Amino acid sequence: MNRHEKNTNVPNMFRNRFLQTILLSSVLLQVGIWVRNFAILLYVADRTNNDPYAISLISVAEFAPIFVFSFIGGTFADRWRPKRTMIWCDLLSAVSVFVVLLTIHYGSWHSVYLVAFISAILSQFSQPSSMRLFKYHVPEEQLQQGMALFQSLMAIFMVLGPMLGTFVYSTFGLEISIAVMGLAFLFSALVLIRLPEDNIKAQTAAVKGQFRKEIIEGFRYVWQSQVLRMLGLAFILAGLAVGVAQALNLFIVTERLGKSEEFLQYLLMVNGTAMLIGGGIIAVFAKRVRPQVLLAIGMIAGAVCTVIVGYSTSVPVTLTVQFLNGLVFPCIHIGISTMILKWSHASIVGRVNGVLNPMFVGMMVISMSFAGALKSTFSLSTIYGGAGLLFFLGALVMVPIMSQKAPDNVHTVVET
């Protein structure tokens, strides 16, 4: 049955059982992730006396699985039943957390890195499965609004997450914080049982030996689509810009604004609050705007705001620009996610996501690693000007595909 035809009678996306369930699951996962992130960060900082190498390993544990497992996870997500995959990933995450918790309790504190590492691996299987279900259960005309809802949820936790994580760790300590994460994943798995049946059959044994062929098929699918090719290039440019800007935010606070390191939290809170508001606004108007236009708007706003932040020495100006940047930044996330869903056939969404996602994260990590060297050679204003230029080039990439419409044949679900 055509997925679009099946869902055209849905009057309100908030009545969509899939969206209700996946949003509740996401809330639980965000609670667990933010408590985990800050518990591990603060614990490692305390344990190693702020050793930069030990602290940097946390990011390695979180991001390395994306390079190694994104293609693999996306391919298997296209093979397996997505609902079952998501439930098992959350259950396995919960089990692994409690196993690691036992090793920490009996003296091996280095096991804290495994908590982030294992969770990141399993998310590479769960996240593309979620994208497949999103495409299957949400009407095409509501995809962009649904993505805006998720962006708003992320923004809420960008504001509340650091406070929640810090509070739990400072009040209850590491072991309780890790246990909270395990319970959050366990409850998420139980919530996902409520998901409607996807009726997407797992692939038969006849094709299970074609793993390499299926990965190559994902790359070929992206390369043959002009829209997805341009989106990949935009991913690369945005990743480079975001990475260097995030890595040097602290120096904006201390050198350009003359404030203490603690002032960085106010910049992040202003930005997160604006993202929450922006996500809500875009959710209202998203249906009327093409995702390419949304992405271009976000890139242009990011370019202008990044340059101003790099040159500003005024606290009010920087805070205002951070607010405006956060207000428009959801356009980038919503535009990218919607384009992946609209231009990818339901049977290959996982692999498309697996091909494109490492482009952004990879470039972000590369630019983060070079940020220190750039800082010792160039001024902050020059570096942020370069990051703004990358954002602007990302917006120009959208120009050739600005008027394209998603092909109709990607809106049907093929039961393989």
Image (spheres, rainbow, N blue to C red):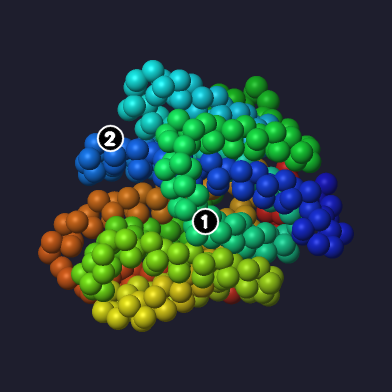
Q: Which tag, 1 or 2, sits closer to the chain's start?
A: 2
Is 30 left, or right, of 171 in this rendering? Answer: right
- Determine crowd level at label 2: few under 14, some 14-19, many 20+ residues with C-alpha closer than 10 A: few
Q: Quadrant of the C terminus?
A: top right
For residue 366, which numbered disc appears in the image? none
Tag 2 residue: 47
216 or 337, nearer to the observer:
337
Q: Is residue 343 visible?
A: no
89 or 34, nearer to the observer:
34
Tag 1 residue: 160
Which of the 4 quarters of the picture holds residue 86?
top right
Q: Is residue 377 visible?
A: yes
The image position of residue 238, as x and y in percent, is 39, 62
Please report the residue visible at 19 percent of the width from the left and 56 percent of the height from the top.
Answer: 372
The image position of residue 73, as x and y in percent, is 52, 36
Which of the 4 quarters of the picture holds residue 405?
bottom right
Is 272 left, or right, of 28 in this rendering? Answer: left
Residue furthest to the top:
106
180 or 327, nearer to the observer:
180
Please report the residue visible at 47 percent of the width from the left and 53 percent of the height from the top.
Answer: 163
Is 385 left, or right, of 171 in this rendering? Answer: left
